[in-house]
Image (tube, grey):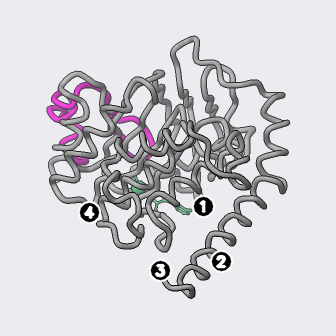
Amino acid sequence: MTPELQEAGARLLAEHQKKIEQEVTSGGREAAFGRLLKHGTPDFAHGVALYLDDITVSFDGFKALNALSLAINVGELRCIIGPNGAGKTTMMDVITGKTRPDAGTASFGSNIDLLRLRENEIAQIGIGRKFQKPTVYEQLSVFENLELALAADRRARASLFSRLTGTQLDRIGEILTLIHLLPEAQRTAGLLSHGQKQWLEIGMLLMQDPKLLLLDEPVAGMTDEETERTAELFLSLEGQHSLVVVEHDMKFVDQLTQGRKTVTVLHEGSVLAEGLLSEVQANDKVVEVYLGR
Ligand SMILES: Nc1ncnc2c1ncn2[C@@H]1O[C@H](COP(=O)(O)OP(=O)(O)O)[C@@H](O)[C@H]1O
Ligand SMILES: [Mg+2]
């Protein structure tokens, strides 16, 4: 590496670190933590990770979500399918605090009222979200991306100012293996394939050990092989995390549900059908609005 490059890299990292630090110390995480203690930590003893009830979201009178109710169990992997405009992304916006519903309730565990928390607070209590497009730090290495994700976690804040601990290094190694990027650890993230970038972003979410992961069309644009590996990755996360996966790729959904898990079909902002993939695929209403087209 030339001195110029080294300098540029150091500058870049410093900028990212400053950004994270600001997020940590300003109105964000510190203040949030005090508020969260008041709310308590999520209680999963009843087996429910996420509970939405009667959620309605209107945009200029148009109901993107219309009395939507949904429950996700602790450790469950739930696939959500449905035509474009069904409200799938809006549902994730509500769960993560990006959009406030007009009506309804949303809770995390049996005790946390999500509708009273801000977006950063929701991330802090263990809900991670993967948007459709990969968002990684393109100029940094795969390893550095994971390191930054670790630094963004307040519990690991010390790593911003000191060297990584052995435990943290182990954790990064574990995640690199899980997301199939161990051989690419020193590679610049910008040079990864689209699928690899998606995995890296999932890895960055996992660094913060979320209880609930929301994944919006994670395999869109992936090759068949990448799609299959992604299904394997999600299946390996099931149990330790709850996962809500929105996807159009039925082969992928089939691989994830293994003929025994519940699939939810969303249409016009409500649940149209729920059941095994084979059941919803045979449902006339589902065929009419979605699969048959
Ligand atoms: N910010 C917004 N303002 C106005 N309409 C919106 C907004 N976000 C989503 N919508 C509308 O809400 C409906 C549901 O959108 P979305 O949740 O993105 O559906 P999906 O993810 O299932 O394709 C669509 O008709 C969309 O145009
Ligand atoms: Mg969407």
Alpha-carbon distance for marks 1 and 2? 45 Å
Q: Is residue 202 above or below residue 13?
A: above
Image height of 284 relative to 109, above or below: below
Q: Is residue 260 left or right of residue 59?
A: left
Q: Is mark 1 within 8 Å of ligand 1?
A: yes
Residue at (77%, 47%) from the top-left corner?
29
Q: Quadrant of ligand 2?
A: bottom left
**Is the residue indicated by label 3 positioned so its CB lies within 8 Å of ligand 2?**
no
* Label 4 to label 2: alpha-carbon separation: 33 Å
The kind of residue tagged 2 is Arg
Question: Dot 2 lies on which element?
Answer: helix
Q: Is residue 255 within the magenta segment?
A: no
1 or 4: mark nearer the eye: 4
Which stretch is magenta?
264-290
Q: In front of the other: label 2 or label 3?
A: 3
Residue that label 3 marks: 1
Asked whether the beta carbons under mark 1 and mark 2 sit within 8 Å of each other, the answer is no
Q: Secondary structure at mark 3?
A: loop
Give the foreground label among 4 and 2. Answer: 2
Q: Which mark is residue 221?
A: 4
Label drawn at residue 60: 1
Residue at (83% x, 36% y) in the render: 35
Task: State the CA–CA distance, disc 2 to disc 3.
Answer: 15 Å
Identify which amino acid the numbered label 1 is placed on: Asp
Q: Amino acid at mark 4?
A: Gly
Residue denoted by label 2: 11
